[in-house]
Amino acid sequence: MQRKSAFSRRLPDLVTEELIAALTKRTSFEFQQLFSVVHENLRNRNAASGGEEMLRLRAYEKLQNLVSRGLVKKTGKKYRGLTAAINAAKEAEKAAAAAN
């Protein structure tokens, strides 16, 4: 029998949230430009902690995860968000949250 813990302490993933927000704009970014936008937004939200290099590594890892999930298209060194795929993923996530 599986037990589900009563409390879920998972914080929202602010780095992925900011990456998606930046990539849903109709422009392509190189990673350096994209990181600058994400870092600035996180600093404005007072959520950029752990040092800039660590944040850069986390952002790159999360970006590659989005690419592998098919939400972001990588062409050469440029990244572009696929709006339809991102919206579909958000809807699926909402449906899964409502089911729990």
Image (tube, rainbow, N blue to C red):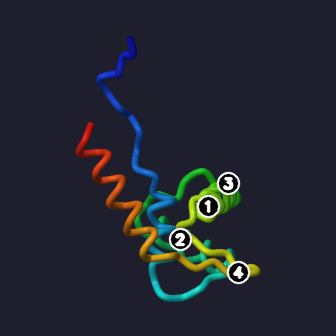
Amino acid residing under circle 3 = Met
Query: Is residue 65 in sight in this rendering?
Result: yes
Quickly name the residue at label 2: 38
Amino acid residing under circle 1 = Ala
Dot 4 or dot 1: first in sequence order is 1
Q: How far from the left and from the top, in percent, is residue 11? A: 40, 44
Q: How far from the left and from the top, in percent, is residue 13? A: 46, 52
Amino acid residing under circle 2 = Val
Is 77 situated above or below 9?
A: below
Q: Secondary structure at mark 1?
A: helix
How many angstroms separate mark 4 from mark 1 (CA)?
18 Å
The residue depicted at 51 percent of the width and 59 percent of the height is 15
How many angstroms separate mark 3 from mark 1 (CA)?
9 Å
The image's mark for residue 59 is 1
Query: What is the residue that sits farthest to the left in this orientation?
Result: 98
Quickly name the residue at label 4: 75
Dot 2 or dot 3: first in sequence order is 2
Query: Is residue 55 in sight in this rendering?
Result: no
The image's mark for residue 81 is none
From the image, state whether disc 3 or disc 4 is nearer to you. 4
